[in-house]
Structure formats: structure tokens, C-alpha cells
Image (tube, grey):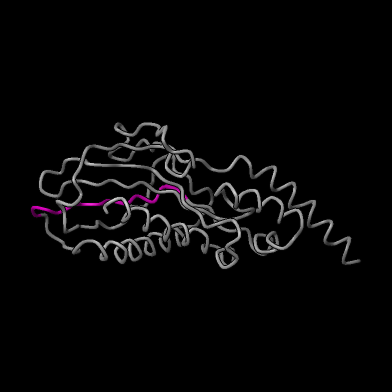
Amino acid sequence: MDRSIALRGLGMLLVGTAVAGCATVAPLPYSEMASSAYLAPDPADRSGRVPYRYSTSVDWRAYNKVVLEPVVIYCGRDHQFGDMSDKDKLALAGYMQTRFADRLRGRFTLVRDRAPSTLRIRLTLTGAVANTPVLGTLSRFDLAGAVYNGVQAARDGEGMMTGSVIYGVEIFDATSSRLLSAYVTKQYPPAYDIKASLGALAAANAGIDKGADALVAQFN
């Protein structure tokens, strides 16, 4: 097959995918999360990364320890895993546990027991999308894909055929169990992150890294 014809064919495929990709998976205020009754649309979030949030006035400087609960894999009817395998869900949950613990250690002492000056954090993995094999990477080099990904990069949007991760964060005072903050977030890598397009879960893992950094940043 002539190379130019093949590239045009790929370009047409990517354009079609870009149009279809405009309707990406959007997070929900998941009905079976403990904080679902508190979550409300966040008008301050223009990125779409954190569409639902609950917050109270908290002096985070009063806390220097944290209990990080084991990551929960959400099983409610409104989950957004699509046809993702249980094996991949477990892999993402394990990666999330490790990365969030690593990031939180830079700000808190990780402990197991509830005590004064201690937060308790629960992470609930509610959905994820895997990368599209091969085409996800090729779309970074094809002309049509480059145009689409360029627009998405400028607006901090999702790249073409790129995976993502969706999860809930609930933060409690460890001694009183009072809910201090909660939110649902969707995270994904920058549109031109080539490394994050390699491997089915690479983009979702990159999203977890970004989300862990964002969580710790709110405590500073």
C-alpha cells in the first residue's frame, strides 16, 4: 500500500475518533460513596477535572499525621470502568495506594492509629479508561492527530485515544470522623505525553501521579 494513502487513512480514522472523543467520560457524584450526599457541582472548576466537591473551613497546618486507608474499588452501578478487567482495576488500585502514600510522606507522617492532629483519607477508584493500543501513540505524530492534540494541550484537555482515571477522595478528622473535605476528580496526562501513551494503563497511572500531587498541594 502506498505510504501516503496509508497515512491519509490513519488521518481520517483519527479525525473520526477525535469527533467521537469530544464526548469523553465525565465523573459522577457516585451514589454509593459515603460522601455522595455532600458532593455538589463546583462552579470554580473550569477544567472539568474536579466537577464535584464538598469543603469546610479547615486549618490543614493543625494536622501532621495521616491514616491512608486501603484504596477501595467502587462496585456501584454507576461505576465508570466500562469493560476493564478486574486484573487492571487491581493494578490501578495498587499503584494508587503506593503513589499517594509516597506523596503524602512528603507532608505527613503516615500512621495506622487514629490520634489527635491526624487525618484519615479514603480513596475510591470509581472509573478508568485504558489507552488505545498503537493508535494512541501514532496520533501524536499523524497530522490530524497533531492538530487535535495541539488544541487539547492548549486547554489542558485529554489527548486523542488516551486513557484516564476517575476517583473520589474523602478526608476525615481521624479522631472525630468528621468529614472535612471530599471531591471526585478525573485525571489524565498532558496531551503530548508520549510516554503516557505506551501501555494500556500508562495514562491512568500518569493521572494518578498528577492527582496525588494535587492532593498534597491543597494541604500546603
Which quarter shows the C terminus? bottom left
To which quarter of the image does residue 39 belong?
top left
Instruction: Point out residue 62 in the picture as x, y percentages from the top left corner.
Output: 14, 51
**Viewer-proximal residue among 194 and 200:** 194
User: Horizontal placement of 140 versus 72: left or right?
Assistant: right
Residue lying farthest to the left in this orientation: 116
User: Horizontal placement of 146 versus 179: left or right?
Assistant: right
| Above or below, comparing residue 88 to residue 219 in the picture | below
User: Horizontal placement of 9 versus 115: left or right?
Assistant: right
Q: How many marks?
A: 0
Residue 122 colored in magenta in the image? yes
Residue lying farthest to the right in this orientation: 2
Instruction: Point out residue 143 in the picture as x, y percentages from the top left corner.
Output: 77, 57
**Viewer-proximal residue among 162 and 58:** 58
Instruction: Point out residue 41 in the picture as x, y percentages from the top left corner.
Output: 40, 32
| Magenta span | 115-127
Residue located at (16% from left, 58% from top) = 64
| Above or below, comparing residue 197 to residue 54 in the picture | below
| Above or below, comparing residue 214 to residue 19 in the picture | below
Residue located at (31% from left, 67% from top) = 102
Residue 19 colored in magenta in the image? no
Dominant SS of magenta comes to strand
To which quarter of the image does residue 104 belong?
bottom left
**Viewer-proximal residue among 154 and 105:** 154
Instruction: Point out residue 193 in the picture as x, y percentages from the top left corner.
Output: 57, 63
To which quarter of the image does residue 36 belong?
top left
Which quarter shows the N terminus? bottom right
